[in-house]
Image: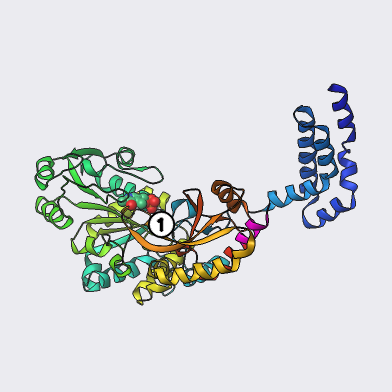
Amino acid sequence: MPSASQNLYALLPQIGELLERESIRALERRYSRAAVIEAARTVVAEVRREIASEDCDEDFVRFRIGHLEDAVQSRLEEDMRPSLRRVLNATGVLLHTGLGRAPLSPAAIQHIAEVAAGYCNLELDLSTGERGRRDDHAEKLLLRVLAIKSSQPAEDLMARYAAVVVNNCAAATMLVLNSLAESGEVIVSRGELVEIGGGFRVPEIMAKSGATLREVGTTNRTRLSDYERAVGPNTRLILRVHQSNFRMEGFVERPDLQALSAMAAARGIPLFEDQGTGCLLDLSDYGATPEPTLAQSLRAEVSVVAASGDKLLGGPQCGLLVFERRFAEAIRANPLLRAFRVDKLTYAALESTLRSYLLGQESQLPLVAMLAATAEQIRARCEALAGRIENSGLRVEVVQVESVIGGGTSPGALLPSFGIALTHPSQSADQLSRRLRAGSAPVLARVTDDRLILDLRTIAPEDDTTLESALRELASHE
Ligand SMILES: *Cc1c(COP(=O)(O)O)cnc(C)c1O
């Protein structure tokens, strides 16, 4: 084969010659000359490697050499495409960490755009002209919303609690443990030493915070008396962790939040709840199993509570930390707060999200719209879409499915829904799934029993036409 290879190398153009070709020079007007040179070199080097690897036959190599100009163009398009792209979520998982959790409301998006385009009063009090705190933008609003949701006078709640915003719930938890329990002990039930999606492990956060974990009870049962016996001179906090992503059944017991809070108060130990979901909604309004809410935490008078902004709250990624004012100095003066702080875009999105709750306009949050969509409405959209792609070459069927709320809600938090099941005469569901992900509008779906299932609950109705185009693109491909 060496002589054949030698001949093939001779067919490759010089880079300089390739760059002079009309179609390549046209690319320089869209991309930079440097980018075009880089792409041409990469593409030619690829073909060289193909010639060297003897498993490419001569016809293939000649074909590649004949299409170098197209290859340079494709390479540039691929390199210049943003890495972070919009995808359509047809998985039926409303809060999908891999897909960025909660989509934001139009009001939040507009607020982000306004704040991002120019300067803003992030740390400036406009009435005095003096330096302000960035948390002022969220603190009062959050406490007002919590007051409404927990049916308490706002003044009372504000007199008792303060709040800060950090990067996520994991950061909020770290900040509390480090600010209030460094070098001391934190009592936790063995049933709550959990790992939450994305590698959040309670014992590891605890170790990094400098606090010592004091485990009580057993995996399935922890009683109030277990906590009481563990309280000692070094106890700084009792930690309660929402058992978000799993469910224990059978011979299980743990004190309810109210009882734990009363016991902690009687012993003079603050109760810190890692609430997780940030839920302010009554999920039973949407036909799902209710989840513990932030309002319940405040009614139980926990001393400190941490939650995510982008789970059931339906806002941007952030961690909300509400704490009794006696801890304000310890938390605000901790350099970790500086390290965990969020930017102006997060405050803009959070403020608009909270304002939707304050105005009773939760339905403007995409998460709430997805929860509220009825199975019948989703079925009608599935049928319309199925009708439009019926003759495309894909076999289409409308099927009953169950959407999953996800994002730290109990695994039983399901909603009846409808979806489109796709099969192809010559391609497996996995192949369809891969191609749908790689399309110009990437779509994520699930594969069940060798069928590709697209749950329309997690697709906004205004995106149905985009989904239709993606399915046509899928069908048109042989
Ligand atoms: C999701 C969750 C976390 C982690 O939240 P992030 O905002 O992703 O850091 C921590 N604790 C509980 C109980 C959770 O549900």
Indicate whether 390 appears above or below 336. below
Residue positioned most to the front:
425
User: Quick one: 370 or 112, which is closer to the camera?
Assistant: 370
User: Quick one: 120 or 226, which is closer to the camera?
Assistant: 226
Q: Quadrant of the N terminus?
A: top right
Residue 384 horizontal side relative to residue 274, left or right: right
**Magenta span: helix, strand or loop, mainly?**
helix
Residue 453, given in percent of the width and then of the height, sits at 49, 56
Q: Amino acid at mark 1?
A: Cys
Indicate whether 109 appears above or below 331. below
Q: Quadrant of residue 395?
A: bottom right
Per the image, the residue denoted by label 1 is 318
- Identify the coloring: rainbow
Indicate whether 204 appears above or below 478. above
Q: Residue at x 43, y 73 (%)?
A: 364
Check disc 1: other Cα within 10 Å, few if <14, some if 14-19, many if 20+: many
Residue 63 horizontal side relative to residue 168, left or right: right
Residue 427, given in percent of the width and then of the height, sits at 60, 48
Residue 120 horizontal side relative to residue 241, left or right: right
Magenta segment, which residues? 470-478
- Determine the secondary structure under disc 1: loop
Q: Residue at x 78, y 46 (%)?
A: 71
